[in-house]
């Protein structure tokens, strides 16, 4: 089974900025080529999961029902573009909760692995932060960093972990993965 985990903000949709959240449908904006990338991966038989921290819910910045509405609309728009997400996993806990699911801990990926009988060793995690790279490492996945969100290539000398691969965006990563 070919498996890809995707972070959401900065990979699929526009990164809202440090310590900011996508708090409404209006603020959720797909990145260019993201829906095309997801459709390409789905067409090539990959199982696709979203694994994302959404601590704004735990902090009270927006409600769970708002997150659910944003997610539902995102999934509809992805399907309209011939894409598919098999399941979405969110950690909505405040970082002080010390839960097992908040990235860089691998809880969200392990949950999916149990539920879908996935081998994490052959999976990829695509994210826009070094936290995502650390999550991949903790779960035993390969890591792909995309440069459409928080992280910049100019900072690579200060990264606490090096990604396995770096691409300019999700579509470039997808084209690499289908080779």
Image (cartoon, rainbow, N blue to C red):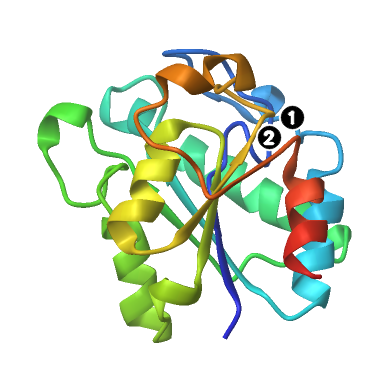
Counting from the top left corner in percent of width and height, residue 18 is at 47, 13
Q: Quadrant of residue 57?
A: top left
Counting from the top left corner in percent of width and height, residue 139 is at 32, 61
Q: Which residue is mark 1?
A: 29
- Residue 129 in view (yes/no): yes
Q: Which residue is mark 2?
A: 13
Say what secondary structure mark 2 lies in.
loop
Question: How many marks do you count on the picture?
Answer: 2
Q: Disc 2 vs disc 1: Cβ atoms closer than 8 Å?
A: yes
Please tell me whether residue 29 is drawn above or below residue 113 in the rendered image: above
Say what secondary structure mark 1 lies in.
loop
Please tell me whether residue 132 is drawn above or below residue 48 in the rendered image: above
- The C terminus lies in quadrant: bottom right
- Left or right of residue 3, residue 107 in this image: left
Please tell me whether residue 114 is drawn above or below residue 164 in the rendered image: below
- Which class describes the residues within 10 Å of circle 2: few (<14), some (14-19), or many (20+)? many
Counting from the top left corner in percent of width and height, residue 27 is at 66, 22
Please tell me whether residue 152 is drawn above or below residue 71 in the rendered image: above
Q: Quadrant of residue 46?
A: bottom right
The residue located at (57%, 33%) in the rendering is 9
Which label number is shown at residue 172? none
Counting from the top left corner in percent of width and height, residue 170 is at 73, 46
- The N terminus lies in quadrant: bottom right
The residue located at (37%, 26%) in the rendering is 56
Q: Cα distance, mark 2 to mark 1?
A: 5 Å
- Judging depth in this view, the residue of 90 and 26 nearest the camera is 90
Mark 2 / mark 1, whichever is N-terminal: 2
- Judging depth in this view, the residue of 152 and 15 nearest the camera is 152
């Amino acid at each position: 089974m070919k498996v890809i985990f995707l972070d959401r903000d900065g990979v699929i949709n526009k990164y809202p900025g440090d310590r900011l959240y996508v708090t409404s449908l209006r603020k959720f904006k797909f990145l260019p080529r993201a829906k095309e990338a997801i459709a390409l991966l789905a067409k090539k038989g990959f199982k696709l999961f979203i694994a994302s921290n959404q601590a704004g819910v735990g902090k009270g910045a927006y409600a769970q029902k708002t997150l659910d509405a944003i997610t539902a609309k995102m999934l509809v728009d992805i399907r309209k573009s011939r894409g598919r997400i098999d399941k979405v996993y969110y950690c909505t806990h405040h970082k002080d909760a010390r839960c097992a699911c908040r990235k860089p801990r691998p809880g969200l990926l392990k949950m999916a692995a149990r539920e879908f009988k996935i081998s994490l060793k052959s999976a990829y995690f695509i994210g826009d932060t070094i936290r995502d790279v650390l999550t991949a490492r903790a779960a035993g996945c390969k890591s792909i960093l995309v440069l459409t969100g928080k992280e910049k290539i100019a900072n690579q000398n200060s990264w606490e972990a090096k990604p396995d691969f770096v691409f300019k965006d999700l579509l470039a990563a997808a084209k690499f993965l289908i080779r």
